[in-house]
Amino acid sequence: MSKVPSDLKYTRTHEWLRTRPDGTVEVGITDHAQHALGDLVFVEVPQAGRSVAAGEPFAVIESVKAASDVYAPLAGEVIEGNPALESAPETLNTDPYGEGWLARVRPTGAPGALLSAAEYEQLTSEEGD
């Protein structure tokens, strides 16, 4: 069973969101997503200053199995991409909810439909976690 921290919000496309004290939002992929992808070999994080729309691809993750887009869970301006992932993509496998964050975004609008931890656990159990 994948880890699903109760203090985060989730998307149906397996991203998580954490609101930071300064109002920015940290975004990453869930434990379920990293487990499904397998060993990660490359991560392309969004560049600071980039404007993103909710639902648009804004990062790419490659594993030994496949390449996958990561979707922006809300509209905003990227204030920082996680530079550590370029040289250590496996951080997403070992610490997806901590050092494995992908980007920090300053929201310009409300996020789309987000799931609670319980709702996300239900979604992943239906997918056959």
Image (tube, rainbow, N blue to C red):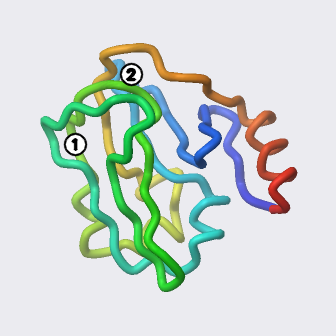
Which quadrant holds residue 110? top left
Could you tell me which residue is drawn at 41 percent across and 73 percent down? 62
Which quadrant holds residue 100? bottom left
In this picture, residue 87 sits left or right of residue 117: left
User: How far separated are the C-alphas under marks 2 and 1?
Assistant: 16 Å
Residue tagged by mark 2? 21
Amino acid on which disc 2 is placed: Pro
Residue tagged by mark 1? 80
Q: Position of residue 120 (x, y in %)?
A: 74, 40
Taking the view exactly as shown, the residue that stands out farthest to the top is 109
Taking the view exactly as shown, the residue that stands out farthest to the front is 56
Q: Position of residue 3 (x, y in %)?
A: 71, 54
In this picture, residue 79 sits left or right of residue 126: left
Amino acid on which disc 1 is placed: Glu
Task: Say which of marks 2 and 1 sits in front.
Answer: 1
In this picture, residue 59 sits left or right of residue 46: right
Q: Position of residue 125 (x, y in %)?
A: 85, 52
Q: Is residue 97 above or below residue 40?
A: above
Which quadrant holds residue 71? top left
* Camera-nearest residue between 86 and 73: 73
Callout 2: few (<14), some (14-19), or many (20+) C-alpha neighbours within 10 Å?
A: few
Q: Quadrant of the C terminus?
A: bottom right
